[in-house]
Amino acid sequence: MSAFVVLGAQWGDEGKGKMTDYLAEKADVVVRFQGGNNAGHTVEVGEKQYKLHLIPSGILYDNKLNIIGNGVVLDPKAMFEEIDYLEGLGVEVTPEKLLISDRTQVIMPYHRILDGLKERARGKNDIGTTGKGIGPCYTDKAERSGIRVCDLMHEKEFEEKLRKNIEDKNAIISLYGGETLDYDTVYNEYMAYAERMRPYVQDTSVTIYDEIKANKNVLFEGAQGSLLDIDYGTYPYVTSSNTVAGGVCTGTGVGPTMITNAVGIAKAYTTRVGKGPFPTELNDEIGDWIREKGHEYGVTTGRSRRCGWLDLVILKSTARVSGLTSFAVTKIDTLGGLEKIKMCTGYKLGDKVIDYFPASLEDLAKCEPIYEEFDGWDDSVADARSYDELPKNAKAYLNRIAEFTGTRISIIGVGPKRDQTITIDEL
């Protein structure tokens, strides 16, 4: 039996989709534990490319059970659009392959409207939200006014909660100068979603527990990255959920003693979308070169990503907070062709040198990266299919990551395709 977590170890966009897809081959169940359709995963299988936002990456296999956990916020419209998109590409999505927790919070039209209006009202202090309604839906969850999937399954209960919420939210929307919602329109739309969704809905906490007890391999898949965690990320430029390994327990209803491994997906360099301090950012030709070669543009938003050298302070902090048992390092092929490559092994903050990630953004903005320099490698790294085939300089770079973080490397990604993956240790 193995119940293991796969999560992003940086600011997101680390290649979780590809790695989850790769690891799902040996998993029986793939569970999404937080976030919503504000994240994007790209998976390449053969000549086909699949862009996933909400549905777990294991859906691309015919014999895997995929589960959307209670820690996710679910936009039914986006989910069914994604199901239709996948089926158009020949991927079957049935209740035998996909289950939804009855405790999952539902994103409503007023969440999307309020997301955009509040972001606009922030002006220059905007957070950079995707406008998908994620934050407002988590707000209602904490405020205890949210609508859950189980409410959708009971028409009378849904009707009462929706009527009250539409009244309350329209008042707020009016204050922001937005267009208010019509109750009947929203009600009819979501009742149609409810009927289509009904066969997929279960108490998935029970399902996951039973699968683990039956010695099945269960993979827990996160969205975004550890530095976007609501508690341990670069607050307030974060998402609205716990992206670290601890989020698995609350986001799926599984106890911590049942989790056997936690794998952090780390890009061989660092990227970030949106505002906030970025100690190793490269605002020069090398940063532009990495962005273009690595195709560093968002799957969901299309926004260009800020690029910089690998930051081991981030990885060490992530390993500590999530109790990582190993790293999967992706995109070392992107760095192929650089004569010299740097990585950050500490921050100079005033007269101190620190190797941990500070909570205060003011402190983080003052941090000066301390670098170690490595000789580069060429593009032949993309052809390697075993650790021994990697260039000597790439091995030295990878070994330093493991040494500094105190966390072994179990997998290496040398390209975007499923077969461009090297397994060092079986999980």
Image (cartoon, helix red, strand yellow):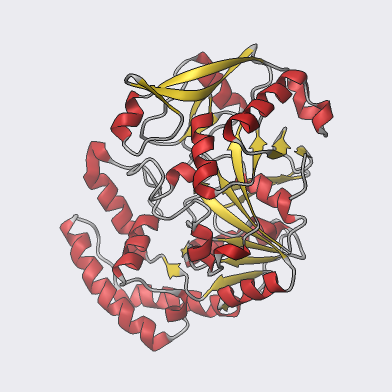
The part of the image, by quadrant, that contains residue 107 is bottom left
Looking at the image, is 366 positioned above or below residue 217?
A: above
Looking at the image, is 216 positioned above or below residue 157?
A: above
Residue 89 or residue 159, whichever sits in front:
159
The part of the image, by quadrant, that contains residue 415 is top right
The part of the image, by quadrant, that contains residue 166 is bottom left
Looking at the image, is 151 positioned above or below residue 19?
A: below
Left or right: 139 as drawn, with respect to 332: left
Left or right: 363 as drawn, with respect to 208: left
Answer yes or no: is residue 227 visible: yes
Q: Please tell me which residue is depicted at 59% across the width and 60% down the height of the picture.
A: 55
Q: Residue 355 at what x, y percent from top left? A: 46, 30
Looking at the image, is 273 positioned above or below residue 51?
A: above
Q: Please tell me which residue is depicted at 47% across the width and 70% down the height of the picture.
A: 104
Q: Residue 235 at what x, y percent from top left? A: 34, 43
Q: Please tell me which residue is depicted at 32% across the width and 79% down the height of the picture.
A: 161
Left or right: 334 as drawn, with respect to 362: right
Residue 75 or residue 272, whichever sits in front:
272
